[in-house]
Every structure is written in C-alpha cells, then in structure tokens.
Image (tube, coloured by chain):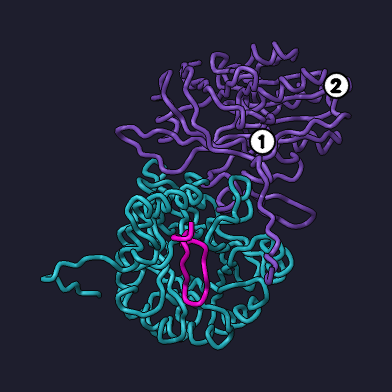
Chain colours: A cyan, B purple
Amino acid sequence: MNRLKTAVGQLQLANPIMPASGTFTEDLADVFDLGILGAHVLKTFTPEIRSGNPTPRVCDLTGGMMNAIGIPSKGLDYFLHHTLPFWARYDVPLVVSISAHSYDAFARLAAAVSVPGVAAIEANISCPNIEADGRAFAVRADTTGQVVTQLRAATDLPLWVKLSPNTGEPVEVAQAAEAAGADALVVANTLLGMAIDINTRQPRLGNVMGGISGPAIKPVALRMTYQAATATRIPVIGCGGIVTVADVVEFLIAGATAVQVGTATFQSPGTMQRLLAGLDDWLDAHGVSSVNDLRGTVMIPDATVPVLT
Amino acid sequence: MSAVAKEVIPTPPPYRCAEALTVVRGNEVVNTDYRLLTLDAPADVLDCAPGQFFQLLCPGTADDQPFLRRPMSIYDFDMQSGSLRFLYKVTGAGTRGLATLRAGDRLNVLGPLGQGFTMPDDWQRLMLVARGVGLATLAPLARLAQARGRQLTAICSARAAEYVMSVDHFRDCGAEVIVVTDTDGSSAPDSMRALIEARIATGRVDAFYTCGSARIARMLQDIGAAHGIPGEIALEQQMACGLGMCQACVRPFRIGGDVVHRRVCREGPVFPLAGVVV
C-alpha cells in the first residue's frame, strides 16, 4: 500500500484516510483495527467541562443528518490522563481537536496539549467567540487571523485549522489562516441548518439549529476544498459527505492532500476500512502510482476562469 | 537493525460487534400496531445478551429515505438456527421502510450493541413490568430467567387486551402473566401499585425489570425505594452511531447529588432503575 503514503506538511501519513473530529472515539475499535488509519483525529474538547446540548441532539435528513451535540467535554485533565494514554498504543499520528470561546483560552489550551504523543492540533474555530458577539471565529477573516495568530504563538506542533462553510468569504478566511501560520486547512465543518417536526411544530433538535453533515453537503465541502487549495499554498484536508472511494478521489482531484470521513462512519462503522482497501484498488486499476499524483489535477476548461469567491 | 519499531498493539479480533448482511425470513403482522421481523443472521452477530440492541439500516421507500440506522432491541436470537428477530411498531421513516421487507430481501444490521440485563444470584423472584414495545425488549430476558430457574411474574400493560404482546411467550417461559389494560382501568398507577405491593407483602419480588413506559418506571422506582427492591430498566433514546462515538443518545442520571449524562448506546441501554431520571 505504498502508493497510499502521503504527508500533510511535515507530518507523514501512511494513507490519506482519517476520521473527522466528533465522529471518532476508542469505541470504534469494537469494529476494526484503528491502527490502519492515516491519522486519528479526536473529538473536540474545551478547557472547561461541558455537558452538551439538550436532546434530541441528532436528526435524520435525506442524504445526511443534522447534529447539535454541543461539544460535551471532560476538560484538560481528563484528556491528559485518560484520553491521551489510550491512543499511545497506536503507531498512528494523533491529531487533537480543541476549541474555546476566547482567543486567550484557545491559545492556553493549544499550549497545554502540546505534549509528547500529540502529532498535530486541529483548531475547531467554528464555535462561538464571546469576544465577537458570539459569532464563530471561522466566519470572518479578521477573527480567524487573530485566533490562528495566537494559536501559532502558543504551539510548535503542526497546526491544522478547520474552516466553516457558514461564511460568505471562504477564500479570505482560508488566506487569513494561512497568513497567520496555519500548517494545513481542514475543509470543512458542518453547515448550519434547521428542521421542524410538522406534527408537533417543534424544532427537531433540542438546540433548534444544528450542523448538517453527510452526502447532502458534499458539493459544498468540495467547492470549499477547491477554493482553499487554489487560494493558498498549504495542504488542504477535505471533509464533508465522503462515503465512497469515488468521493475520496474527487476531493483529491479538487486539491485535497488527505480526507476526513465522519458521518459515513455513523451509517456504516467499517467505512474507513473499506475506503482504504478500495482506494488502493482504484489507484492500481487506474495505473496511478501514488495518491499524491491525483492532488489538484482538476481540469478546468481553458475558456473558464472560475471566480473563487 | 538500526531502529526499533514502536510496539503496536492492534485491537485483537474478534471485534465486539459487526456489520452483517442478513436475509429476511419473514416479516409478519402481529396485530394492528406491531410486526415481527425474522432474519437469517450469521453467527458472528448472534452472541447476544437479553437487553442488547442492533442498529438496522432500514430500506428507503418512495416517501422516505432514512439515512441513519435505527436502534431496535432484540426480541429473540438463536445461534443454533441462525435467527434474529425484532418486534416493532411502524412509527416513522425507518420502521415504514422495515415494513416493506419481504422474505428473501437483504437487511444490513450492526450489532449486538450495548449492555444487556444482569441477573445476580440473589434475584430469584423476578417481576417484569412493561408496556407496548417494551414487552419485546423483555422477551429474551424471560427466556434467560427460565433457563436459570428463576421465578417469574410478568405484568403486561397495553391500551386494550388485543394489543398485549408476548403473553404466550412469557407463559412459555414459565411466567405468571398478569395483563393490565387502559380499557378496564387496571393499568392505572394506583391499581398497578396495589397489585405489585400485594405481591411484595407476601415476599414474592426480589427485583424488577422494566421497559417502555416512563410512568411505570417512576412507579417502580417509588415502590423499589419504599421496599428496598432493586431493578433494571432498558431505555430508549434517539441515536446516530450506536457505538458511543457521537454522544447523541445521552440521558440524565442522578448519581449522589449530581446529574450526569450517560450514553444509552454504550453504558446502556440497560441501567439500574434507581438513578434514572424518567
């Protein structure tokens, strides 16, 4: 499976398949050997202990799902003393997803998780920023730039920044993250949505609104992956609605270096294991000697100059 | 050898649960509300415990395309005959899809999942109290109780007598079956409480098992606290992954002075009756 080897910046990966944050815990080891994955991306945790949102926390959609889990978090001590030791058994890069509601708290958490055993930090900047009227850091280029600058100063680990599709300026946000020192972009988080039960007239999520994920948002994530890969020089990790080998290949062609798989694991927990075998077979069948040869090979017709924003 | 490879400890197979493609053997109407689905399932998903559940990848229909799997408690499992059965009520997109299955169709299942019922040695005289589809969840427990020689009383609650399920099954398991219904008023909390306390008075209940009704659960918590009788409850909650990853299916529990959230799919679906907030 040498043709699957890739790298996100300096971080070498055995293959480009990894879980999306929030859809992956040690519980998946009940289904397959997690040692086969390209990286382990853990669920976001926050400095403070949080219990999460009221139920229902998920609802079913056509072609996907919507969630408002609310980042239940057991805090830093639990992470350092329970979560981190568990993952040490695997020889797979560990990517730790963190979030916080202020620049300072975010930076302090980044410093606190910069410990042996952690290969990279994924900054979930889609959470509300209390210093910007509760708007997510990721919706504006200036707040993205500020938070990434502070995170960059707080850690020497590779810093991945997970972008949000809930912005009208995806290119500016991606460039702001790059300029502030991000080593890679994860594109993208869930798309904000809402659903109502017409019989009870109540929202179908306890939090009223939630994040849509799954195949329904794949074109949005693919478009943002293309935008980010075209507008920056740092690696892009595609994320959003990936279910099949064809989806993986499509994101790589759009410009992704690696991909994250999330909601598909909820529907079928063996998805990533199947994608790994299937991607290798696909490369073999198409005479592609390295997965890296696919990256950014999208053929835009000559007459077309896409407007990135 | 210049470099020593880091010791890698892969998770050893066999894995705790598996995704399996089953074949529908039958999918019959039981009464106006319920259907019984019988599957031919491979042995690697049939090492089940009563109270555990499966996540079913329900087929779509012209009107519905369910995306997430639907959790369904096991009604019956048999390693010898390779059969796995679910008793379900058609209530939404997932179960509407299940109702379209015909003999010979395929169904992808994931399981068995969660923690089943326990049956400590000092729980000799068991009282099962359930309503609606909760009766289905207790069906395999009754079989286990019989196999272990436990004395069994099953109080089966329903809207009306024609909707009471599993009465024959409980009788086959050696249970004394008491049917209570809304139509004759016997399912009202006061009537049920009197019925249960009369049995406690004559020393006939070591433990309760329940599923399917918050009202019954609260009543049993009350009676249990008053008479020092422990019990277990199988809970339901909307789920996404069913494995413990997504944190969607939490329910609140009173532990000491605190309220803590536990995952129905992972720490449950069976919990001690006492701490559950119902």
The residue where tag 2 is placed is: B204
The N terminus of chain B is located in which quarter? bottom right
Q: Position of residue B269 (x, y in %)?
A: 65, 40
Q: Nearer the viewer, residue B250 or B52?
A: B52
Give the extent of the magenta segment.
A1-17
Residue A225 visible, this orientation: no
The secondary structure type at the circle numbered 2 is loop
Name which residue lies at 35% across and 61% down. Answer: A251
The answer to which quarter of the image holds residue B67 is top left
Q: Nearer the viewer, residue B102 or A48?
A: B102
The chain identifier of the residue carrying mark 2 reads B
Q: Nearer the viewer, residue B15 or B251?
A: B15
Which is in the foreground here, disc 2 or disc 1? 1
Name which residue lies at 85% across and 21% down. Answer: B204
The answer to which quarter of the image holds residue B144 is top right
Relative vertical location of residue A174 with respect to residue B190 in this rendering, above or below? below
Residue A260 visible, this orientation: yes
The furthest residue to the left: A303
The C terminus of chain B is located in which quarter? top right
Disc 1 marks a residue whose amino acid type is: Ala
The residue where tag 1 is placed is: B234
Q: Position of residue A172 (x, y in %)?
A: 33, 80
Q: CA distance from mark 2 to mark 1?
A: 22 Å
The chain identifier of the residue carrying mark 1 reads B
- Left or right: residue B152 versus residue B74 is right
Relative vertical location of residue B146 with respect to residue B7 in this rendering, above or below? above
